Amino acid sequence: MNRVLRFFRRLGPRTLRGRLSLVALTTAALLMTILTVTFNSVMDRHLQHQADDELRNRAAAVATTIDTSGPRVRVLETVNDRLLDANVWIYAGTRLLEKPPSAPDGTSLTQAADRLAAQRKHACATVQAQGRSSVRVCSQPFPGRQASATVVTALSLAPYRSSADTLLLGSLILDTVMLGCTYVLTRLSVGRALRPVRTMTDQATQWSAVGSDERFGTEDHPTELARLGASLDALLDRIRTVLRHEQQLTGELSHELRTPLTRIIMELDWWRTRPRTDAETRAVHEVIGDAAQSMRTICDTLLNEARGDALNPTTAPGTTDVVPVLDRLFRQLGTPDRMMTAVETETPVLEAGVAAPLLERILSPLLTNAVRYARARVTVSVRRGPGTVRIDVVDDGPGVAEEFVDELFLPGRRADSDDGHDGAGLGLPLARRLARAVGGEVSYDRGHAPGARFTVSLPAG
């Protein structure tokens, strides 16, 4: 059974227009079949009634030649006697008085006339005559004062059958033409109705590939197309968001991996300048290993955050002591000898309720910018607040231009792209996004002078 269904599905049309056209054609075929059968049945009954009326009229004409006023039935001779006697039987009771010359005894037609006359009431029957088409036979009693007669008339149904066959053939031809027109008009109508859908599909495909801002809207569209346009607009918005997140993740990975890659390249360049001792080689290997591990940690952290796992306790368990993380980041940055760095804390141990890799990614852009723009000193102070840990990163550099403060945390924005420092404007937006992902915040103090002060607030461990 399943194979048969699959076979018929493969035979069916693949397009929506073809399927709707097939449904319309099937529906029209069923409706026309019912109408054709009904129409021809009604016409058959109508033609039969016409034949019965003709036989009744002929019987009435023959009755004018029958005398039933006496004790016996007499048949009167008339001028048109030969015409009236054609296919006519006259009975007195059940006794046959006259019959057609062409109807010998024992034939099916004569036997049918005898049966109808014996009923002594108006009755009709259809008889299949030998070597002829169907014949309609009707009996009509004519009672008199002393005797009664019955006239049986017969009529060939060949002309009526011919008319019925002609009507059937005509209706079948008309049905065929109507079905053809229905199929063609349905395909044209459905194709025209689906043309906007096809256009919208092509446009949506093109817009989704490039993340376009174009949208369909719901104005000047029929209700169905307006709903489709709204659905496609929502889908395009989600696709654009995914593309933007993908671009953002790519940019952030590139930005965060640049520092450990630079360390690896610098160590390899230094190691290749001249032959090194085993101790120096081992030191290079250690630096490269640390940088590679840092790259792996960066990738895992950003990918987990992109998957929405930053708040998942299975991927970011436990708490982290802030001070060791700050010391490790300062060592990796390699601050110049002229610059002083200090970490100030209220207590030796201050724990934040985030994982160590995530804490590094939040603090790293802030410390990198502070060391990059500070003149002589970078100070980091860590203190506990109500349910939070607050980390202030302060430098004595030129600070942030007032006109750029509002764009400070926007991805891809830099205050001065010609300041001689590498950067893509992604560090601070990344730090704020990761902090907010765990319920924290990164902010800039507009009123601090001179220099710049950034504050990181994180849940306490």
Image (cartoon, rainbow, N blue to C red):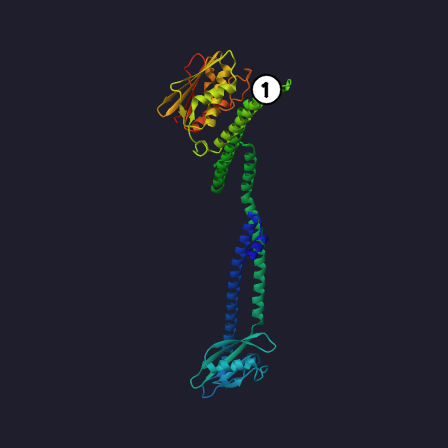
Amino acid type of the residue tagged 1 in the rendering: Glu
Q: Which residue is drawn at 58% across and 24% down?
A: 285
Q: What element carries label 1?
A: helix
Rendering coords of residue 394 (x, y %): 44, 16
Question: As drawn, which residue projects farthest toward the bottom?
Answer: 71
Rendering coords of residue 292 (x, y %): 55, 26
* Residue 262 can be seen, yes or no: no
Rendering coords of residue 328 (x, y %): 48, 21
- As rendered, which of 192 and 136 lies closer to the eye? 192
Rendering coords of residue 188 (x, y %): 57, 47
Q: Quadrant of residue 195?
A: top right
In what quadrant of the picture does the C terminus appear? top left
Question: As drawn, which residue projects farthest toward the left?
Answer: 386
- As rendered, which of 82 and 102 lies closer to the eye? 102
Residue 112 against residue 379 in the figure, above or below: below
In what quadrant of the picture does the N terminus appear? bottom right
- As rendered, which of 205 and 249 lies closer to the eye? 249
Number of labels in the image equals 1
* Residue 360 can be seen, yes or no: yes
* Residue topped by disc 1: 280
Mark 1, residues whose alpha carbon is within 10 Å: few (<14), some, or many (≥20)? Answer: few
Residue 378 in the figure: left or right of residue 261: left
